Amino acid sequence: MGINAEFEDKKGFKISLTDDKVYVTAVGSQETFALRSVNGIGTYDDIEDYNRQIEEYKKKDFRFLIGVGIIFFFFGVYSLVEISVSIVCFILSFICFAVGAKAKSPKDQAKMKSYFRLMLSGGDRKFQFDKKASNAKDVADFCNKVEDTLTAYNK
């Protein structure tokens, strides 16, 4: 009863296939499924959650800091007579420019969640894995081997 196929990401998720079972190990849990209860396998990307994360980050608009920095800069130039006020204004404008420019785009902030999805007789189960740390070819190869084994098992 050797392992026919196996997939593992770098964050502790591992799924293995034998002739009659599928073993799933995730951080904090381990589950075993008999092949007779598995109807199919696939991957699932949670695009709705990804789009929600992008919209939430867009609400945090950092461009106003650049505008505030410009106001402080002009106020500092205008009040060059008072050196201490001018220095404080230049420091504040620098801080506003630095924070405003450092803000990342919403797509850099959002994280796409990917799942292995086992279709079972009584529903389905999703197991999150790190798609960025994994080779897409390995994921597809594993899914194909499970489908081949299921086809052979159900004949």
Image (tube, helix red, strand yellow):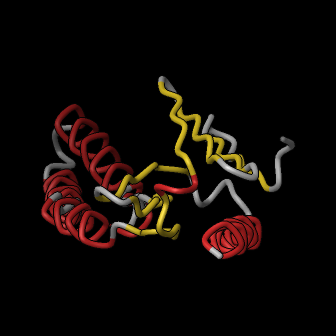
- Image vertical order of residue 58 relative to residue 26, above or below: below
* 124 to the left or right of 143: left
Q: Residue at (17%, 58%) from the top-left corner?
A: 60
Where is residue 149? Give x, y as percent.
71, 67
Q: Residue at (52%, 44%) from the top-left corner?
A: 33
Name the quarter where the C terminus is drawn: bottom right
Q: Residue at (53%, 56%) from the top-left corner?
A: 36
- Image vertical order of residue 100 relative to residue 90, above or below: below
Q: Residue at (13%, 55%) from the top-left corner?
A: 75
Query: 147 or 58: which is nearer to us?
Result: 147
Residue found farthest to the top: 28
Where is residue 73? Give x, y as percent.
23, 57
Query: 145 or 43: which is nearer to us?
Result: 145
Query: 144 or 101: which is nearer to us?
Result: 144
| Number of numbered discs overlaid on the protein picture | 0
Query: 78 or 70: which is nearer to us?
Result: 70
Name the quarter where the N terminus is drawn: top right
Toward which corner of the image does residue 136 lie, by quadrant? bottom right
* 85 to the left or right of 150: left
- Image vertical order of residue 58 relative to residue 115, above or below: below
Where is residue 107? Give x, y as percent.
39, 69
* 108 to the left or right of 68: right
Residue found farthest to the front: 155
